[in-house]
């Protein structure tokens, strides 16, 4: 019966007239590849989340396309100056500047202060197409994972998510990634992270 319904829907002339042509003349989307660490880093902002006692409501997410190493930083706001400050002080200061920084077209990422920071560090700034979140799929996919992990960690106390964020990131970067077969830590740092369970 399912096959009959499918056939009827495909051959219905009224449906075909209303739907219009189904041919897609656009080029197929390609996954953005990276050949080494920090060649391309995806950037996104998650939130608003429940406001914490520290005043944080957002998370700046940075995901390396090659290693899958992901860094996440709590933010009080999404202002471009806040994003640029966190990028420089908490990411570039530790890992160096990525070759390319990729984001959606959010105002926080396209403001002059962020573009000037990219210029000063020699970072190529790219962005995904409007209304196409899959263009920044690395960071977008991690956002779902992060929300799942945070909801487990802060169960019963959602206002403390920013306190748990570093531990969530430790767990994520210490777990084998399905697409690489290794942990983000080994791919990015060349060694596994020592966890509390490893200390005897």
Image (cartoon, rainbow, N blue to C red):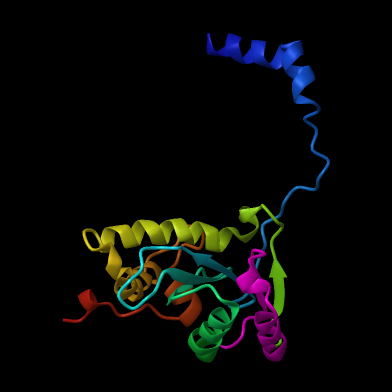
Q: Residue 103: x, y in percent?
A: 63, 67
Judged from this view, the residue extending furthest toward the right is 25
Q: In percent of the image, x 83 and y 41: which residue is there?
A: 25
Residue 70 horizontal side relative to residue 84, left or right: left
Corner quadrant of residue 124? bottom right
Q: Is residue 186 visible?
A: yes
Q: x and y percent of residue 89 in the render?
A: 51, 89
Location of residue 38 by image quarter: bottom right
Q: Is residue 35 visible?
A: no
For residue 31, above or below residue 115: above
> Image point 77% across, 30% down: which residue?
22
What is the count of numbered marks? 0
Asked whether residue 114 is drawn in magenta, I would say yes
- The residue segment tinted magenta is 96-121
Q: Residue at x 59, y 11 (%)?
A: 5
Direction from residue 194 to residue 101 in the image, left or right: right
Viewer-closest of 51 and 132: 51
x and y, in percent, of residue 192 in the image: 37, 77
Residue 8 percent across, percent down from the top left: 65, 10
Residue 32 drawn in magenta? no
The C terminus - image quarter: bottom left
Q: Looking at the picture, tell me which residue is in the foreground, 141 or 56.
A: 56
Say left or right for 86 vs 18: left
As rendered, which of 186 and 31 lies closer to the eye?
A: 31
Vertical side of 190 occupied by 146: above or below: above
Could you tell me which residue is drawn at 67 percent across and 52 percent down?
A: 131
Q: Residue 93, relative to residue 5: is it above or below?
A: below
């Amino acid at each position: 019966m399912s096959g009959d319904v499918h056939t009827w829907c495909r051959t219905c002339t009224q449906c075909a007239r209303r739907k219009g042509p189904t041919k897609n003349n656009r080029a197929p989307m390609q996954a953005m590849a990276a050949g080494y660490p920090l060649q391309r880093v995806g950037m996104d902002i998650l939130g608003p989340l429940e406001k914490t006692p520290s005043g944080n409501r957002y998370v700046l997410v940075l995901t390396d396309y090659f290693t899958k190493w992901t860094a996440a930083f709590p933010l009080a706001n999404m202002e471009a100056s806040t994003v640029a400050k966190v990028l420089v002080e908490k990411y570039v200061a530790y890992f160096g500047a990525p070759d390319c920084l990729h984001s959606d077209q959010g105002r926080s990422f396209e403001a002059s202060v962020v573009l000037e920071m990219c210029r000063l560090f020699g970072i190529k700034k790219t962005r995904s197409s409007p209304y196409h979140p899959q263009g920044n799929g690395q960071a977008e996919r991690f956002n779902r994972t992060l929300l799942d992990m945070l909801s487990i960690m802060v169960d019963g106390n959602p206002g403390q998510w920013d306190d748990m964020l570093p531990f969530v990131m430790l767990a994520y970067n210490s777990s084998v990634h399905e697409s690489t077969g290794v942990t983000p830590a080994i791919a990015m740092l060349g060694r596994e992270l020592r966890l509390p369970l490893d200390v005897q």
